[in-house]
Image (cartoon, rainbow, N blue to C red):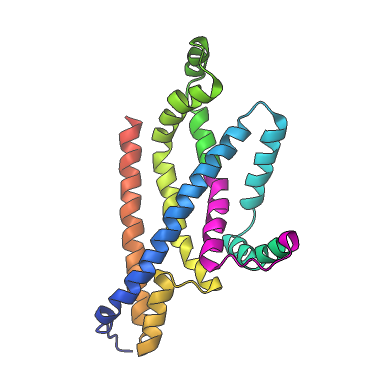
Amino acid sequence: MDMDFSGVVQAIPGMWNGMVMTLQLMVMGIIGGLVLGTILALMRLSSSKLLANVAGAYVNYFRSIPLLLVITWFYLAVPFVLRWITGEDTPIGAFTSCVIAFMMFEAAYFCEIVRAGVQSISKGQMGAAQALGMTYGQMMRLIILPQAFRKMTPLLLQQSIILFQDTSLVYTVGLVDFLNASRASGDIIGRANEFLIIAGLVYFTISFAASLLVKRLQKRFAV
């Protein structure tokens, strides 16, 4: 079978729009997931058994189910829940449902990364901060978390690469991400294989470059 990539150039604008959608989902998922994950990590490290158990149950639940199920659930089930609560139809839309799904799903993984990062900090620094009269919030904000996030950066980037690849699952709710835009462009001119090859090369190039960055950061922070 002959390969013809001549139609790729004309399809670049549409594919770029899909890439913008992919990057938007990834960035918003990372920011929201990291914020929620940090809160969950602090809950798991809390002396309160209730907070620790709630956070632990959250992490175990979301790490035990596929992301595709989370996306579908938010898209299909959440409107029914909102209708039951408010008595009115409250559609949240495909984009919003996917962003929320990514945030909540990734938070479970970011939680464990943050928790490990905090635990890697010497307890002596915590004791010194307490001796200086710092509150728990000040100690975490000014001393522990800045150092922990520096150590966690490679792992956070690695998880972000996984999320970048996982954004392709939004095709199930009709969002046109980069992969879906590439596939649709190929279907229009009857060259689906060529466009899927191009999409695969783009995903590989971005993911491989980010992986090299992760390895470089790991070596740098290990010094």
Q: Is residue 5 left or right of residue 52?
A: left
Q: Position of residue 49 (x, y in %)?
A: 71, 30
Q: Nearer the viewer, residue 116 or 97?
A: 97
Q: Residue at x 47, y 63 (%)?
A: 167
Q: Residue at x 35, y 78 (%)?
A: 195
Q: Is residue 113 left or right of residue 198?
A: right
1 above or below 98?
below
Q: Position of residue 111 (x, y in %)?
A: 55, 41
Q: Is residue 23 left or right of residue 5?
A: right
Which residues fall within the magenta stretch? 84-110
Which quadrant holds the C terminus? Answer: top left
Q: Position of residue 3 (x, y in %)?
A: 29, 85
| 208 drawn magenta | no
90 above or below 62?
below
Q: Determine if residue 153 is in view.
A: yes
Q: Residue at x 36, y 66 (%)?
A: 19
Q: Position of residue 213 (x, y in %)?
A: 31, 47
